[in-house]
Image (cartoon, helix red, strand yellow):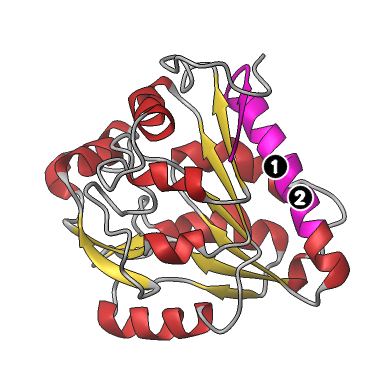
């Protein structure tokens, strides 16, 4: 695993997007399709803005899979991750093949349908974030590192729900759905490459726990340290509590 620290979240987003664009071009140069996993949330704003502006990516040959979504939240809600992906990725690039998690339908049926499509072939690149509680997708601690299914239905813990309020997606914690559909840890780790975009001081405790503590379900994103081709992009704020020097520091 490689860790790179940039000056601020804008520089982080641009550097991660440059890396992601290069990876997509490389895959598309040898394959008819590039299969990706896309994350959402405030941490991905600058990254997706830069990535969707990158040149020479044949987005019509990109197939996208959804990382997680709230159960029961309509697509018209500002916090809908489907809405987010349409506005910040799909419409901007013209991606034609995408598999979104419809939280308004029977979640078990959604899991079966999208999971079948996801497991039909390998994933080339997964874009992820790390939550304030160390979660990876909506796998809050203690995360299940052994579950073999592609997706699962999870109960969101208080720290995760509070983060959604602090980022402005919901007015109060009582408005945050209690359940979500999440890609499993093992499924995320199957990706050939993982690029994690993790800005902001609010993530600094989770970053320290995941990068310098034990690899443990108590710090779900710590599992990224075991992936053979993972890169974590931090800014000075999210890296501020780390004890050890990391590559690419500014």
Residue drawn 35% across the image and 61% down it: 69
- As drawn, 105 above or below 125: below
| Residue span colored magenta | 1-25
- As drawn, 79 above or below 184: above
The quarter holding residue 155 reads bottom left
Please name whichever residue, 69 or 86, is drawn nearer the observer in this view of the structure.
69
Please name whichever residue, 9 or 249, is drawn nearer the observer in this view of the structure.
249
Q: What residue is pinned by disc 2?
A: 21
Instruction: Examine the rendering and report whether any part of residue 106 can be seen.
Output: no
Residue drawn 33% across the image and 24% down it: 205
Secondary structure mainly formed by the magenta segment = helix
Residue 241 in picture, x, y percent from top left: 41, 15
For mark 2, does the 10 Å Cα neighbourhood hold few (<14), some (14 to 19), or many (20 or more) residues? many
How far apart in space, not on screen, are marks 2 and 1 (Cα)? 6 Å
Instruction: Examine the rendering and report whether any part of residue 180 can be seen.
Output: yes
Within the magenta stretch, is there residue 7?
yes
The quarter holding residue 109 reads bottom left
């Amino acid at each position: 695993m490689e860790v790179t620290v940039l000056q601020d979240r804008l520089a982080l987003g641009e550097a991660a997007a440059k890396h992601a664009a290069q990876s997509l071009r490389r895959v598309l140069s040898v394959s008819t399709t590039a299969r990706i996993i896309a994350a959402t949330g405030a941490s991905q704003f600058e990254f997706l803005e830069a990535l969707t502006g990158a040149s020479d990516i044949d987005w019509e040959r990109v197939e996208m899979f959804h990382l997680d979504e709230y159960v029961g939240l309509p697509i018209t809600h500002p916090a809908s991750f489907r809405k987010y992906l349409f506005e910040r990725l799909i419409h901007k690039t013209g991606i034609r093949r995408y598999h979104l998690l419809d939280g308004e339908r029977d979640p078990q049926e959604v899991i079966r349908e999208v999971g079948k499509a996801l497991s039909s072939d390998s994933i080339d690149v997964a874009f992820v974030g790390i939550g304030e509680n160390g979660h990876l997708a909506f796998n809050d601690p203690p995360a299940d590192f052994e579950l073999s299914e592609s997706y699962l239905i999870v109960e969101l813990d208080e720290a995760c729900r509070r983060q959604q309020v602090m980022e402005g997606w919901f007015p109060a914690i009582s408005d945050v759905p209690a359940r979500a559909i999440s890609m499993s840890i093992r499924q995320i780790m199957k990706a050939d490459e993982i690029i994690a975009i993790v800005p902001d001081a609010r993530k600094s405790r989770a970053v320290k726990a995941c990068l310098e503590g034990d690899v443990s379900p108590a710090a779900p994103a710590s599992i990224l340290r075991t992936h053979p081709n993972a890169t974590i992009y931090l800014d000075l704020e999210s890296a501020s509590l780390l004890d050890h020097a990391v590559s690419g520091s500014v």
